[in-house]
Image: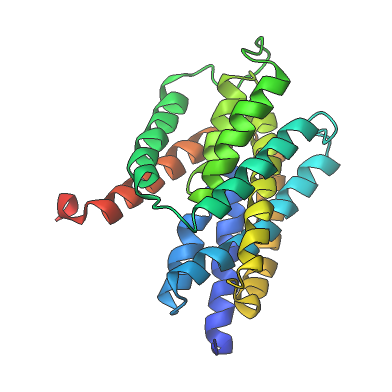
Amino acid sequence: MDLSLDILGILFLVAGIAGFIDAIAGGGGMITVPALLAVGVPPAQALATNKLQGSFGSFSASWYFVRNGLVSLKEMRNAIVMTFLGSALGAELVQRMDAGVLTNVIPVLLVCIALYFLFAPQAGQGGGEAKMSANMLALTVGTGIGFYDGFFGPGAGALFTVCFVAIAQCGLVEATAKAKVLNFTSNFAALLFFIAAGLPIWEIGLVMAAGGFLGARMGAKVVITKGRKLIRPMVVIVSMIMAIKLLWEQNPQWFQ
C-alpha cells in the first residue's frame, strides 16, 4: 500500500499512544486496529499488521520490566512455553474457524474484570497464598489465554493480569509485568503464523512498531513509578471501554 508521510506519521502517533496504554492496562489493539482499517488496510492484513506492531510494543514493556527485576524469565519459563503453544494453536485455528463465539463471551469477561478491580479493594495488594501451583497456572492460564490471544485477542492483557492477581495472588505491579511478558509471547507466536501466511504489511507495521516501542517503554516506566494507584483505575476504564466497543460492533441496534 502507498500511504502518504502524513498518514504514516499519524499511525506512528496512534501506535505510540496505544503502546503506552497497553503497557499499563492492555487494550492497545482497540486503538490500532480501527486506525489500520480507517486507512484502508483489509481486515485480515490489519489484524496481522497489528500483531507485528504490537509485538514490538509488548517486547519493549517486557524488556523494561525484566531489566528492573519485576519478572524472572527463569521462573516464568513454563508459562512462556505454554502461552506460545496456546497462541500458535489459536492463530492456526482462526484461519479455519469462526470467532463468533468468543466475540459474544469476551465483553462479559471484560465487564467482570472491571467490576472485580472496582469492588474488590484488596485486589492487587499481593502477599496472599497462591490458589494454584505455578505449573498448573502455566498449563491453564498460559495455554488458555494464549489460545484466546492468537485466535481473537482483545483484552488478553487484562485477562492475564486478573489471573495473576486473583489466582497467583501477585501485587498489581508484578501482575502487570508478568502479564506483559506473556502478552508478548502470545503476540510473537501469532505473528509467526501471520508472517507465514504473508499477511502483515511491513512498511506500515514497522512504522507503527517504532511508535509502539517508544509508547510502551514510557508506559512501563509509569507502571513502576505510579504503581497500583494508576493501574487499577486504568484496567477498570480500559476493560469497560473494550466491552462497550465490542458490544456496539456486535449489536449496533442497542446504541441507536
On screen, 134 above or below 153? above
Is residue 193 visible from the viewing direction of this image? yes
**Residue found farthest to the front:** 96
Asked if residue 201 lies left or right of residue 248, the reply is right
Looking at the image, residue 100 lies above or below residue 230? below
Residue 123 position by quadrant: top right
Question: Where residue 110 sits in the image (x, y, percent)?
Answer: 41, 37
Q: As rendered, which of 235 and 80 lies closer to the eye?
A: 80
Quarter of the image that includes the C terminus? bottom left
Q: Which sits in the foreground, 250 or 96? A: 96
Residue 10 position (above or below residue 54): below
Q: Total marks drawn?
A: 0
Q: What residue sits 71% from the left and 33% below the top?
A: 79
Find residue 111 and report its image quarter.
top left
Left or right placement of residue 14 versus residue 247 in this view? right
Q: Position of residue 157 (x, y in %)?
A: 57, 42
Task: Give the residue at x 65% y 67%.
Answer: 195
Residue at left offset 21%, top offset 56%: 252
Left or right relative to 194: residue 214: right
Q: Nearer the viewer, residue 186 or 237?
A: 186
Quadrant showing the N terminus: bottom right
- Which residue shows up at 62% across the image and 70% down it? 208
Q: Is residue 229 visible?
A: no
In this picture the colour scheme is: rainbow
Image coordinates for residue 200, horizontal then vertical, percent:
60, 71
Q: Position of residue 224 (x, y in %)?
A: 71, 38
For the view shown, which residue lies furthest in the top direction?
129
Residue 9 to residue 140: above or below: below
